[in-house]
Amino acid sequence: MVPEDEEEKNQRPMCARRRARILIAMIEVKGLTKTFGEMKAVDDLTFTVKPGMVTGFLGPNGAGKSTTMRMILGLDRPTSGTALIGGTPYAQLKEPLRTVGALLDAKWVHPNRSARAHLQWMAASNNIPKSRVDEVLHLVGLTEVAGKKAGGFSLGMSQRLGLAATLLGDPQVLLFDEPVNGLDPEGIVWIRKFMQRLAAEGRTVLVSSHLLSEMAQTAEHLVVIGRGRLIADTTVTDFVAKSSESTVRVRSPQLDALRSALTSKGLTVREDGIDGQPSLLVVGSTTDAIGDIAGAQSIVLHELADQRGSLEEAFMKLTGEDVQYQGDTGDDVMRGGL
Ligand SMILES: Nc1ncnc2c1ncn2[C@@H]1O[C@H](COP(=O)(O)OP(=O)(O)OP(=O)(O)O)[C@@H](O)[C@H]1O
Ligand SMILES: [Mg+2]
């Protein structure tokens, strides 16, 4: 058995190394603001992105996601505030490609270059060994088409090539701006799993999207913005639990009696109905409590079901007023994008 103080000694450097790795991989945004003319595209944003999990950067169109990512990557200059990666602004990173990989626009490749030539050019200009090119091509499943012109690639293949480029320097921090936009379901699942794998390897993964349902399946943590402002910085689970109302749907052939029984217990009840079948939605109660109330008065129930708040509902509720471009059917426009 290892003596206790020996054990402690062995563990100490491990912890210090781990802490250092976490600090190196953190993205820290503080008071970040960007104005274009009169318009505040990003408005005093403060959040931290941690390693080891996928963080979803969520917001409706025009919320300021891309602008924020561009500032993190030193492509846009903040009007005020800071964006640091491992405590350093991107522009001051010694070996940026070995620290941060970013995919902002997958179509940014020379159309006449082959996938391999594109990556070799990037590797050479960043002092990365040529052998890494075939490694990353293999990682993203493009080995077989590595010699083909990138200009002829489908969107899915271009996304994979973009991912390969982000991985060239084996960076700890990865940023992806709407990586699943326009992809077919198979491509979406592939990218989702890929990101989760990168996070499971201990990397920091920030991925932007306006696709709520997609983020719910991909991310563990969410940074939600609307009109450039922070709306939520929380886990996916908490976001849904805190933001959406939980209700119980109840159907009965004795709806009037049931309504009276429930309201007499102080419960809030709303009329509802699906497919012409009238029902009640009871706010802030449980199926057990409602079943007991109905049972006590011998009221027959035909349905008693928890209505768990969806991520979409939570998002709509929170960002509804922060949608920049909203037509008359704002809700429908938003839902179309979800
Ligand atoms: N270079 C620019 N000049 C002027 N306005 C800009 C510029 N870049 C962005 N904007 C504006 O800033 C706001 C935020 O844009 P941004 O592209 O960051 O949003 P987004 O959340 O990425 O949206 P989307 O989901 O559509 O990609 C928008 O109103 C946009 O029109
Ligand atoms: Mg964008």
Image (cartoon, grey):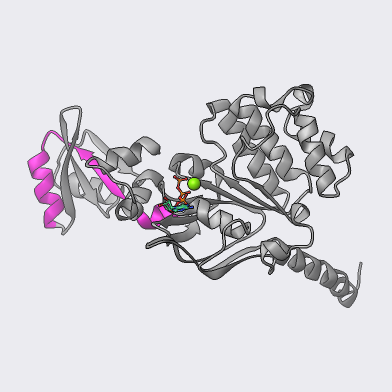
Q: Is residue 200 left or right of residue 286?
A: right
The boundaries of the magenta stretch are: 238-264
* Residue 244 appears anywhere in the view: no
Q: Residue at x 41, y 46 (%)?
A: 61
Residue 6 sits in which quadrant?
bottom right
Going by the image, does 21 lie left or right of 51? right
Query: Which residue occupies 13% across, 44% down?
Result: 258
Picture quadrant where residue 224 is located? bottom left
Query: In which quadrant will I find the C terminus?
Result: top left
Percent coordinates x, y for residue 85 in the rendering: 67, 63
Which residue is found at the position 68% from the left and 61% from the top? 90
Question: Nearest the camera: 46 or 238?
Answer: 46
Residue 240: x %, y % from top left: 41, 52
On whether residue 253 falls in the magenta region, the answer is yes
Left or right: residue 158 versus residue 317 is: right
Give residue 292's position: percent from left, percent from top.
23, 49
x 67%, y 38%: residue: 162
